[in-house]
Structures are given as C-alpha cells and as structure tokens.
Image (spheres, helix red, strand yellow):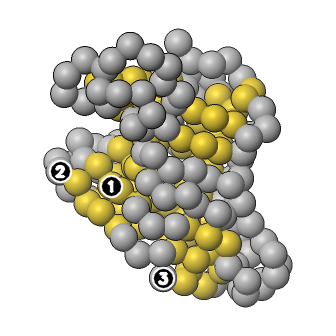
Amino acid sequence: SNLNASSGNVTIGGVHASGTATFSGTLVLNPCSATATRVLNLTSATGGTTVFSNTISNGTLGGNVALPVHITGGGVVRLDAANTYTGLTTVASGATLGGTGSVAGPLTVSDGGRLAFTLSSAPGSHDRFDAGTVTFSGSSTVTVSAAGSAPSTGTYILLRGANTLTGTLPT
C-alpha cells in the first residue's frame, strides 16, 4: 500500500483485545510534498498483538522526506521485516514494540514505552531488533520472556543500534 497525502495521519493495526492480527502487505511512505506532516501510527489494542511481516519503506513522491512511524496502543506491535524507511520510530507511552525486524532510522522509546523480546530455546533464533540510533527516555522498559522451555545457556543479542545507544538502559 502507498500512503499518499500531504498531511494527516494514518493508523493501521489490530483492534482485538486478544489474539494476533497480521498485516503482510508492503507499506510505502510517500509524503507527496517536501513539507508533509503525515505520520504512520502502527497500533495494537490492549491484550492483542499486531504483526507487520513485510517491509515498510520510504517512497519517492514529494522528494526524499523521511516520514515518522509511531508505535501506539496498549498491545504489542511486532515489526518482523528489515524495514528500510529512515524516519524516526517512536514507541509511545503505554505501547510495546517487539519482533525480529529492524528500522533504518532512529528509534526512541518514550517515557512509559516498552521493548519486548521473547527468547527461544537456542541463541540466535530469538527476537532481536536492529535500529539506527536508539534512545531510551524516562521510565521506558525492556522486557525479556522465554517461549516454552527455558532458554539454553549462551549469548542472546536483543537490541543493536547501528550508531549509538543513548539514555539510561532500562533494567
């Protein structure tokens, strides 16, 4: 889907308080003008999970403007693809970002926002997220849980910032 307009926000996500909604289409962020104020909100209702399994990328209409993506809602939003958009990704207060994907631009976890990771039974096949510069603000949190049986002993890389990690890493 192409998100085309010069202003206004678009919200895509799950509205169910349980279960998982999966969006498998490719999203292209087209600002349509160099002064676009559009924001893409990816959301999940409290108790639910919304999975975006295909790439989100910058568009070419309106010049090379990197539009922001906001993670919102009380559920879990999973980005499970190698996303190439370069706008700021913000995890809002009360929202949770998880998944096995990446964002090319900076990632900010707002005060009250959360990153969530699920460990598999063996290192290397678990949730891990890659981003540009990663910033933790205020009382942001990171949660780690195990899927099924206890994970094996080993090194589990959860988050990688291409440039820097800033703020206080949540404990």
Q: Residues within 10 Å of mark 3 (few under 14, many from 20)?
A: few
Return the x and y of residue 154 as percentages of the image width and height.
Answer: 44, 17
Q: Residue at x 65, y 28 (%)?
A: 137
Report how far apart the C-alphas of labels 3 and 2 lie in the structure: 24 Å
Above-or-below relation of 92 to 141: below
- Image-based side of 111 in relation to 31, left or right: left
- Determine the secondary structure under disc 2: loop
Q: Residues within 10 Å of mark 2 (few under 14, many from 20)?
A: few
- Determine the secondary structure under disc 3: loop
Q: Amino acid at mark 1?
A: Thr
Q: Residues within 10 Å of mark 1 (few under 14, many from 20)?
A: many
Residue annotated with mark 2: 19
Classify residue 147 by image quadrant. top left
Q: Residue at x 53, y 28 (%)?
A: 157
Report how far apart the C-alphas of labels 3 and 1 lie in the structure: 17 Å
Residue annotated with mark 3: 1
Q: Which mark is residue 97?
A: none
Q: Amino acid at mark 3?
A: Ser
Return the x and y of residue 165 as percentages of the image width and height.
Answer: 72, 29
Residue annotated with mark 1: 50
Q: Residue at x 81, y 81 (%)?
A: 63
* Of callouts 2 and 1, the N-terminal one: 2
Q: Residue at x 49, y 38 (%)?
A: 128
Q: Amino acid at mark 2?
A: Gly
* Of callouts 3 and 2, the N-terminal one: 3
- Determine the secondary structure under disc 1: strand
- Image-based side of 59 in relation to 47, left or right: right
Q: How many marks?
A: 3
Classify residue 2 by image quadrant. bottom right
Residue 38 visible to an observer of this rendering: no
- Image-based side of 48 in relation to 30, left or right: left
Return the x and y of residue 85 as percentages of the image width and height.
Answer: 66, 64
